[in-house]
Image (tube, helix red, strand yellow):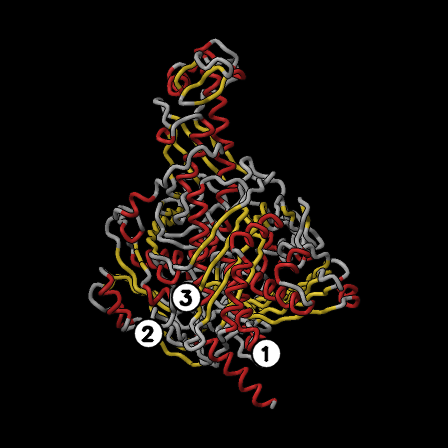
Amino acid sequence: MSGKWTPSRIEDGPLVTGRGRFLDDMDPLPGTLVAAVVRSTQPHARIKGVDLSRARAFPGVAAVIGPDEVLAALKPFPLSTGAKMEYYPTGTDKVRFVGEPVAVVVATDRYTAEDAAELVAIDYEPLDAVVGARAALAPDAPRLHDKADSNVATDRTFCFGEVDKAFAEAVHVVEGEYDFPRYSSVPMECYSVIADWREGADGPSVETWANFHGPFTMVPVMAGALGIPTSKVRLHVPADIGGSFGIKAGIYPYVVLMALASKHSGTPVRWTEDRIEHLLASSTGADRVMTFAAAVDADGIITALKADLVDNVGAYMRPPEPSTLYRCYGNLTGPYKIGAVEIRARAVVTNEMPTGLNRGFGGQQLYFGLERLMDAVAAATGRDVVEVRRKNLITTFPYETPTGGVYDSGDYQAAVDLAVKNADLDELRRRQEAARAEGAYYGIGVGLVVDPSGTNIGYVGLATPSEQRKPGRDKSGSTEHVRISVDMQGLVTVMLGSVPQGQGHATVARQIAADRLGLPVEAVRVVIDMDTATTPWTVTSGSYSSRFAPLVTSAVVQAADRIAHTVRAAASVMLDLPPEELELADGTVRHRDDPSRAVQFRHAAGVVHWDPGVLPEGTSARLYEEAAFTPREVRAATKDDRINSSLCYGFVAELVAVKIDPDTLEISIDRVSSVHDAGTVLNQQLLDGQVYGALAHALGGAMYEEFTYAESGQPTSGTFLDYLCPTSAETGYELRSDHVVSPSPLTPLGAKGSGEGSSMSFPVALANAVADALRPSGVEITKLPLHGEVLHQLLSSEKNTEKELS
């Protein structure tokens, strides 16, 4: 991009004036009835019987379906592993978490449906529940799925390099066990679905609307569950989906469930989740228990790393899980040149809400453990936390990690230096000394992360041992499609295959297309509604894993350049000049060396529409181009289980300073210095927005948000009284944000993703700061979230331990 201008977001006007098009505002089909979902009150119980008769007899009810109807019509959803853990959109033999659907009532309106739902009688045989990853691993733990051997849904071990030798020769072996909480994204609009089952002469079909954002593996999954061809499933996604950041990638159970409800009612059916349902049963990021160990030499260099990762995926390993375990596989060593790695990766099921994607999924968990470990390495070697990181940073690119990741570009040292400079680290340390002299707590924390973008879906295959992966049936890559057309008046339309969540895709796509075609942005419009029957898409399409900047924009460039080629050819006829001597600029097609010889872009486009016979030989009369950007650098996993799990790898260096009130133990953030390297900056306003948004999201998981359960399996954070979300008041700290630019050689514009960086770096940087503040008290920080109550418990425990020792 030229970098000459940064237009305002074109998405904002409708949203701030109440003209957004959300699914719950839409009524695409006449005669649509409304559904209510009957949910389990039990965390773990056998379903002995379900009586639907009273609900079916209730006035205004069109249909009621339960486990019998689900088993008669649906097949279980396919899982990413061979675990014998069948998953349907309702409980069938059992219920396995509070909030799991058991039945659906379809009625004239939501009030009637809710009233009738209360008449559904379910006979439960309560069973012991299992809560938390550690409990699920116990040999005598209650088993959720009777056909499975245990609660372990996947268990794989990988080893690269001479790990044992490095640990045997290490001067220091540094270990740590860490817990990362389950928290979510809390979208403005909860899940919403409209489904219409139709019986035709050529068999049944389903047309659905959902505020879902991909990947579109959902379509074949839906088709498989419903027992119809994929060509008979049509999915619409509105332009505005009310936020997601990952959790609406697991929405498909409700789409299938409402399709079945539509089949039984004989009408279109709509369902919109309320907030209590969402906090009980929608989706959450996976909580992780992890153990790390580092082999460290006398100079503070890490020579080998061991990681034991256990993800709690809730009641079912719902696709795309176990993505959280493997998404950061290629960048498991972070920004450090560690030559040998051993990994054990497990996912376990528990009587909790199923998990899915949550902004920075996999990276949040990984870096909490890895960057807490780096502080432990600094302590063990007597070095400063910044110094020990600098000593281990990667300095040359491209760099290949032991696990197969190929970091495309970067300047990690420059980013760290800038973060330290902007933080004014010397001043912060003076503040710390002054605070400690007064008996107060003040800490400084660091978090460095590699930020992957442009996911290679092949990483999910790692959950299956290589000898069991079928030859010729590999999965890999990431493709994004874009269509661009030019009408007879020279106006350009860009149709995207991704589904944005508010990031500004239309603004950037418009900017890029205009730049490549030499047009003012007003001459370009962008269409972002998704209709799987008409919009270009692939199985991997979507806005997850920061795909837009590296993948979608690359497809925009390709399609726009093809359009430009045709327009130059048309203009060459009008100007009697060779096409290769022409350029597109300022709304014209002109001679590169003599701008006075020019025609308007719209006139050249008009030749293609109105007078195609005069086009040069071999030039197609086509101003409608589709491009699919498919990078060759992302392939399937190798036989020895190495994979480049993303196309691009950015970098974030973050410093956080915190003050802790010695009386209330309230944590307040004093300063944040955040430096991002996302390659070429496509739009500074949007990059800043992503940084601010990721920091706010990360603040929730670091200090406030956590889905919790009693030992009985009952949720204890089912409302906003218990599940606390940060507001603008909590984000009022001093932020010093900056960036360095290391263009990616793998994308036409040099851009990388930037939507998730601080969501991965901030939680651990804050944890490191709190640990630094409390270090004189001997308190260790091994889990999140952190707030006054947690600190009180930690300090009280430490004092009690000291008393016992004395």
- Report whether 370 appears left or right of 527: right
- Cα separation between marks 1 and 3: 27 Å
- Cα separation between marks 3 and 2: 15 Å
- Report whether 647 appears left or right of 194: right
Question: Could you tell me residue 644's position as x and y percent?
Answer: 63, 49
Query: On the image, numbered disc 2 is attached to which residue?
Result: 51
Q: Residues within 10 Å of mark 1 (few under 14, many from 20)?
A: few
State the SS at label 3: loop
Which badge, 2 or 1, is on the more N-terminal residue?
A: 2
Q: Residues within 10 Å of mark 3 (few under 14, many from 20)?
A: many
Nearest to the eye among marks 3 and 2: give it. Answer: 3
Which badge, 1 or 3, is on the more N-terminal residue?
A: 3
Query: On the image, numbered disc 3 is attached to which residue?
Result: 90
- Cα separation between marks 2 and 1: 36 Å
**Residue at 44%, 28% in the rendered image:** 624
675 or 290, nearer to the observer: 675
Question: Which residue type does callout 2 highlight?
Answer: Asp
State the SS at label 2: strand
Residue 168 sits in quarter: bottom right
**Residue at 63%, 71% in the rendered image:** 176
| Total number of numbered discs in the rendering | 3
Question: Which residue type does callout 3 highlight?
Answer: Thr
Query: On the image, numbered disc 1 is attached to which residue?
Result: 138
**Residue at 47%, 42% in the rendered image:** 537
State the SS at label 1: loop
Nearest to the eye among marks 2 and 1: give it. Answer: 1
Nearest to the eye among marks 1 and 3: give it. Answer: 1
Question: Could you tell me residue 544's position as x and y percent?
Answer: 48, 50
